Amino acid sequence: MKTCIVGGGSWGIALASVLSTNGRDVTLYMRSSEQKEYILKNKRSPKYLKDFIFPDNINLTDDLRSLDGCDLAVIATPFQKMEEILIEIKPHLSQKTIILNVSKGLNIENCETGEYFANKICPDNKYAVLSGPSHAEEVSKKMITTVVICSKDIEVAKSLQDLFMNEYFRVYIHTDVSGVEVAGALKNVIAIGSGILKGINEGDNARAALITRGLFEIARLGKKLNCNMMTFMGLAGMGDLIVTATSVHSRNFRAGVLIGKGVPVERLEDEVGETVEGLKTVKAAHILSQKYNIEMPITEAIYKGIYENKDPHKAILELMTRSKKHEFLEEMVL
């Protein structure tokens, strides 16, 4: 399966390393010719995963014509650029090309997932999504990682499972594309909240509670969008949420820590050094919660902290003094 990964950031490089390990034919596309030339000369990226040494069987290109004839196009760019990227690469795809989205988010303008844009722009192509607890830093070091690849066409999911799976990168398959994409997007919002708690010196108790109740909020929205509720208990849901909301590798968690310490929102991505998808996703989640009249108090508190400059301590006090609740009776999401 001839594969082209579109996006030379951390995750694109990490997935290229997996396919390289598996002896696959993989090309890594990056816009920057300077970045490509630097890697060709030094065998390392000047910005991403700087300790990773590029093997010879990862082909580098800055020419989209390299996608011509590919069997699999992996979209590893920031999510808000997905529509633009799909329009750009479409002329180079054949109808047999599978599109695999590995970025996570909701579009800021219409709150849609990656599947929406793939169906809109490339309706004749099969679509799949890869998600789960998988920091690029660890994958590039061949540390044990488990993910899920999801497609409405189970045979597509099986073929991609065969392509990516090896002794350190275990792949499960699933068919609930919507659930996997909603879970992958919303966990970034909760991760920012977890980071904020860390930034204001709250403890593990508070963060564990936020992660647990945050998962309920994600599942609430998923239920409204007709997702499979078990998805939120799996790798794309609980698994990805835990790792993203607790690890220093998580750019969303690190952004939350900076917010808690008083760093202005407009400086966050410069400080973190990469795109922080949750900053846009929280706005989309806020819009969806209002559209469907879904109670998502944690998401709402994070939204107000980012877009309305609400003091984190006041937001926490409001969350803690809300009306009394039964933990499960009103949820019944499973």
Image (cartoon, grey):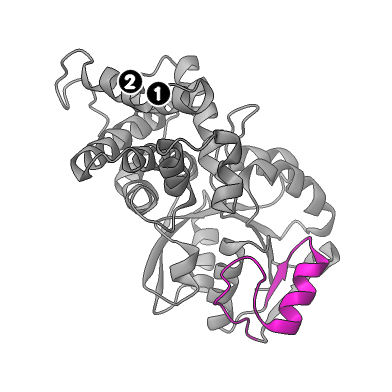
Work out whether 293 lies above or below 76. Answer: above
Work out whether 24 lies above or below 91. Answer: below
Location of the C terminus by quadrant is: top left
The segment highlighted magenta reads 26-55
Which residue occupies 67% across, 87% down?
56
Q: Answer whether residue 172 is visible to the viewer in this image.
A: no
Q: Position of residue 113 (x, y in %)?
A: 57, 38
Number of on-image labels: 2
SS type, badge 2: helix
Q: Position of residue 238 (x, y in %)?
A: 31, 47
Work out whether 65 lies above or below 289. Answer: below
Q: Amino acid at mark 1?
A: Asp
| Circle 1 residues within 10 Å: few <14, some 14–19, many ≥20 | some
Q: Which mark is residue 122?
A: none
Q: Is residue 185 left or right of residue 95?
A: left
Q: Amino acid at mark 2?
A: Lys
Q: Nearer the viewer, residue 250 or 331?
A: 250
Residue 87, image quadrant: top right
> Pointer 2: what residue?
314
Residue 102, image quadrant: bottom right
Instruction: State yes or no: residue 53 in magenta.
Output: yes
Give the spatial CA distance, label 2 vs label 1. 5 Å
Q: Answer whether residue 283 is visible to the viewer in this image.
A: yes
Location of the N terminus by quadrant is: bottom right
Q: Nearer the viewer, residue 183 or 187?
A: 187
> Pointer 1: what residue?
311
Q: Nearer the viewer, residue 175 or 279?
A: 279
Q: Nearer the viewer, residue 95 or 65?
A: 65
SS type, badge 1: loop
Q: Verify CB contact (< 8 Å) between mark 2 and mark 1.
A: yes
